[in-house]
Amino acid sequence: IREHVRDGDVVALEGFTHLIPFAAGHEIIRQDRRNLTLVRMTPDVIYDQLIGAGCAAKLVFSWGGNPGVGSLHRLRDAVERGWPRPLALEEYSHGAMANAYDAGAANLPFATLRTHAGSLTEVNPNYRSVTCPFTGEVLTVVPALRPDVTIIHAQKADREGNVLIQGIIGVQKEAVLAARRAIVTVEEVVDDFDGVYPNACVLPRWTVS
């Protein structure tokens, strides 16, 4: 974290349920990082802690809250009362953010969607439209997500640095590939990935900083 997360960075901590990178988030708080743009499809308790600790200047997200504990109180304080500091918001739909990570991973400038942005255009000017040069169809576009650093959690890494993610894969792979730098925390380091791993993904070592 000390080497790869810097004040003012765009930082994505992605992963759901058992793959939320809490330890890395707590280390960002410990190191007193400031003016971060935090990116996460579903900012929940760890982002509430980062916001409450004054680490965040902006939040890029698609849904804020936690199914288990409800509203995010520090997020609400930052938006409504500017405490502990004001927080800018950039809101997308889940589909738009997933596609924006895809575009970032492919080194493309924007993601193209067939869905209409609806009322999100009232709060996010980054929703735009383009006309397909082949069909004439008008499509919705959003800018690619290219974090300065993505942080994820996974079950295993081997001694060469390859990473095994198992369970709800989510957008971890795309978020890592879209980032300029990537950090992965794991439960254990193993000699090799032996066995059968249903619903799993292996990130090769060259994707991890």
Image: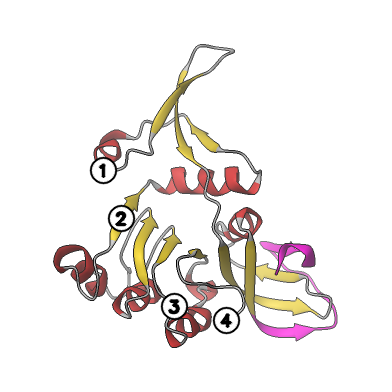
Residue type at tag 1: Val
Q: Which residue is more in the foreground, 143 or 203?
A: 143
Q: Position of residue 12 (x, y in %)?
A: 50, 63
Report the magenta residues as a range. Answer: 186-209
User: What residue appears at the point 44 percent right and 61 percent down from the top-left corner?
Assistant: 40
- Residue 182 lies in what quarter of the image? bottom right
For the residues carrying marks 4 and 2, which lies nearer the camera in this image?
4
What residue is pinned by disc 3? Answer: 33
Nearer-the-camera pick, 179 or 162: 179
Q: Nearer the viewer, mark 4 or mark 1?
A: 4
Count of labels shown? Answer: 4
Query: 86 left or right of 96?
Result: left
Q: Which numbered disc flags the more N-terminal residue, 4 or 2?
A: 4
Q: Would you say residue 194 is visible in this rendering?
A: no
Quadrant housing residue 76: bottom left
Q: Quick one: label 2 or label 1, which is nearer the N terminus?
A: 2
Q: Tag 1's secondary structure?
A: loop
Distance of label 2 from label 1 (alpha carbons) = 9 Å
| Residue 123, numbered label | 1
Residue 162 rendering spot, x and y as whole percentages:
78, 70
Q: Nearer the viewer, mark 3 or mark 1?
A: 3
The three-letter code of the residue at mark 4 reads Arg
Sequence-wise, which precedes: disc 2 or disc 3?
3
Q: Nearer the viewer, residue 6 or 204?
A: 6
Secondary structure of the residue carrying tag 2 is strand
**Neighbours of disc 4 within 10 Å: few (<14), some (14-19), many (20+):** few
Q: Position of residue 77 (x, y in %)?
A: 19, 71
- Is 179 in front, or is 76? 179
Left or right, 201 with respect to 25, comes to right
Which residue is labeled 2 in the image?
A: 89
Q: Which mark is residue 2?
A: 4
